[in-house]
Amino acid sequence: MKIMEDQPLQGLTTFRLPARARYFARVRDLEELREALAFARRGDRPVLILGGGSNTVLTRNFPGLVIRVELPGLERIDGDGEEPCLLRVGAGEDWPRLVERCLAQGLFGLENLAWIPGTAGAAPVQNIGAYGVELADRLQAVEALDRTTGELVHLDKQDCRFSYRSSLFKEDRLRDRYVITSIVLVLSKIPAPILTHTALKEELASISMGSGEVTPLEVSRAVRRLRRRKLPDPAELGNVGSFFRNPVVSATVYRDLKARFEGLVGYPEPSGDRVKLAAAWMIERLGWRGARRGSVGVHTEHALILVNHGTATGEEVMALAREIQRSVEETFGVTLEIEPAVY
Ligand code: FAD
Ligand code: NAP
């Protein structure tokens, strides 16, 4: 494993913000990961873990060691063809490719999560979710290197404290403790499409009304079409997906807001007493969609996504984010939390 000095990070995150790493290493196995962490410990250097960089906002040069996790691996661990299928996936595996491979092998359950950029190792960090399914629905365990003890640990789903776009790995106190090395997914050979999400249901309406059954492959294709229509391609326009998490408020607050703002979009949480508000609706209502501040902007097709029009800096991104947060707070009295990791 090679430790490189003064490395540019711009090409390693999908926002493509300018920043450099004092030290940088790619790790392809556990031994290299341990070596890299030992290097950081010896020099008392901070560590930043990077996967595909699609949920990371860099606002400055990083003074310590950036470790890019590239651990490979895809292994059935359920014995011979049992149901459900257990799949251990190395943290460095590309998530969209993994979903494609599973579908091709007749292993179902990830189709709603198709085309989410990034690595398998980062997926538990924010409990990735889309179109009515979240990682926690399909995950059995996480394996990680505990940086406080140097031990490899096995965390069951319950240990991961998954919630809406969050987990133990995002908690302030624990954010730097674990490096995820692999995840164990629970998949099935029996198709059971989840069509609860409004836009996905509509996209597939013609199929389900016609021939009846919708297949997992059709779901993943519909997800791809929806995403292509609305989401900016990071190769063309730097972004990290949704910049803010949808806020969850009490049913009373929702009722009050709904009475004041016609058309406000909210979805009751399964528990019934809380409602998830569509942050994009509020931001759009305040006229932010398509707005620009220099090289940073709000995507023209999606008010929840901030984009880099070319030469944006982390400071500019955060300044625009704060402006949007202030205006939503002033009008709706709701706090928007930033979803990606900000360094
Ligand atoms: P990175 O950005 O590299 O890392 C994200 C965080 O995880 C950082 O804090 C990092 O330190 C930590 N991390 C990364 N790897 C590890 C590891 N091995 N161990 C411990 N910590 C680690 N997200 C959704 O939930 N749903 C979506 O539908 C969705 N759509 C998106 C669409 C676009 C166009 C884009 C650009 C992003 C989207 N995202 C979405 C966000 C992003 O794709 C996910 O959060 C993804 O899981 C990030 O993976 P990554 O490897 O790129 O993470
Ligand atoms: P959308 O279809 O315009 O819907 C807007 C919001 O309403 C979504 O955030 C979604 O919440 C919620 N919603 C819609 N139908 C729902 C239902 N039947 N029950 C409960 N909630 C419902 O959303 P979009 O922005 O185009 O994104 C589509 C999907 O991809 C969403 O699931 C979204 O989370 C995901 N996505 C995530 C990111 C990211 O970076 N985190 C980026 C792009 C897309 P949920 O967000 O809870 O699903």
Image (cartoon, grey):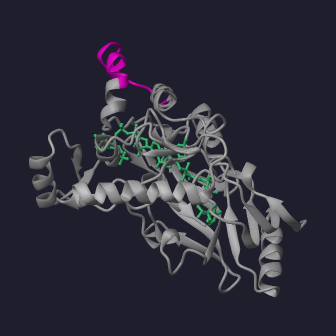
The image quarter in which residue 31 lies: bottom right
Q: Residue 147, located in which quarter of the rendered image?
A: bottom right
Is 210 covered by the magenta stretch?
yes
262 sits to left or right of 43: left
Q: Nearer the viewer, residue 226 or 257?
A: 257
Residue 222 locus on image (x, y percent): 45, 26
Q: Residue 123: in sight, yes or no?
A: no
Give the quarter of the figure containing the N terminus. bottom right
Position of residue 252 relative to residue 192, above or below, is below
Q: Nearer the viewer, residue 10 or 328?
A: 328
- Residue stretch rendered in magenta on the structure: 203-216
Is 27 situated left or right of 321 in this image? right
Q: Residue furthest right?
A: 2
Counting from the top left corner in percent of width and height, residue 288 is at 38, 43
Residue at screen point 69% across, 50% down: 93
The image shows residue 175 at horizontal and vertical percentages of 55, 74
Tell me which residue sits at (43%, 60%) in the image: 322
The answer to whether residue 181 is above or below residue 258 is below
Q: Judge by depth and name the residue closer to the eye, 330 or 37.
A: 330
Reply yes or no: does residue 122 show up in magenta: no
Task: Identify the residue at image location x=37%, y=31%.
Answer: 200
Q: Is residue 148 visible?
A: yes
Quadrant containing ligand 1: bottom right
- Residue 240 relative to residue 50: left or right: left
Task: Looking at the picture, tell me which residue is in the foreground, 2 or 31.
Answer: 2
Image quarter where the C terminus lies is: bottom right
Q: Residue 206: percent from the left, percent from the top?
A: 34, 16
Residue drawn at x 90%, y 65% as measured from the top left: 2
